[in-house]
Image (cartoon, rainbow, N blue to C red):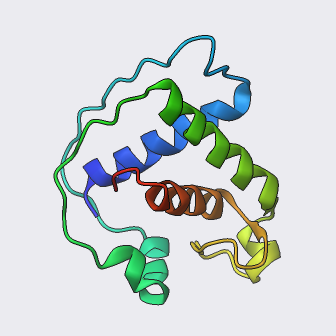
Amino acid sequence: MSVALIRRFVAAFFVIASAAHGFNALASEPQASFETTGARTTVPYGWVDFCGRRPEACHVPRLPPVDVSLSAASWRLLDQVNRQVNASIQPVSNLEHWGTLLDHWDYPVDGKGDCKIYALYKRKLLLDAGFPR
């Protein structure tokens, strides 16, 4: 996984997370920007493990980056997914949940998880809703 991909994933996560802080999509549309990327980096262990268990989420072709219009409708969908996921997952640490300090990435199969579980599930729902990977 490249640094660019990791940064895009993190940026998308923070855009989605910001919706939890009371942004009113009807008042105004958000302004977006981009982040310059750097050199390649190693793939996080949690991603490798996740892909081993969920190859359908990972064994996909490389795609060029695309701009997403942050219209009122797309922002409402981001907010809806953010609120749905935040309400459906009980926050717990990897140690409490899985009995390990190792990084564990997955979907909320039992309704519990840490920040990676939230982010991966939001990613899945947004992809299912038609947002580009």
**117 displayed left or right of 38:** right
Query: Residue 20, located in which quarter of the rendered image?
Result: top right
**75 displayed left or right of 45:** right
Q: Residue furthest top?
A: 27
Residue 89, relative to residue 5: is it above or below?
A: below
| Residue visible at 20% across and 56% down in the picture | 40
**124 displayed left or right of 52:** right
Query: Residue 92, located in which quarter of the rendered image?
Result: bottom right
Q: Residue furthest bottom?
A: 53
State which quarter of the image contains the C terminus.
bottom left
Residue 55, relative to residue 87: is it above or below?
A: below
**47 displayed left or right of 33:** right
Q: Residue furthest front?
A: 73
Looking at the picture, tell me which residue is in the foreground, 92 or 54: 54
Residue 19 horizontal/vertical position (percent): 64, 32
Residue 35 horizontal/vertical position (percent): 30, 32
Residue 91 horizontal/vertical position (percent): 80, 59
Looking at the picture, tell me which residue is in the foreground, 34 or 83: 83
Looking at the picture, tell me which residue is in the foreground, 99 or 67: 67
Q: How many marks?
A: 0
Residue 69 horizontal/vertical position (percent): 35, 30
| Residue visible at 27% across and 36% down in the picture | 67
| Residue visible at 62% across and 17% down in the picture | 26
| Residue visible at 25% across and 58% down in the picture | 2
State which quarter of the image contains the N terminus.
bottom left
Residue 90, relative to residue 50: is it above or below?
A: above
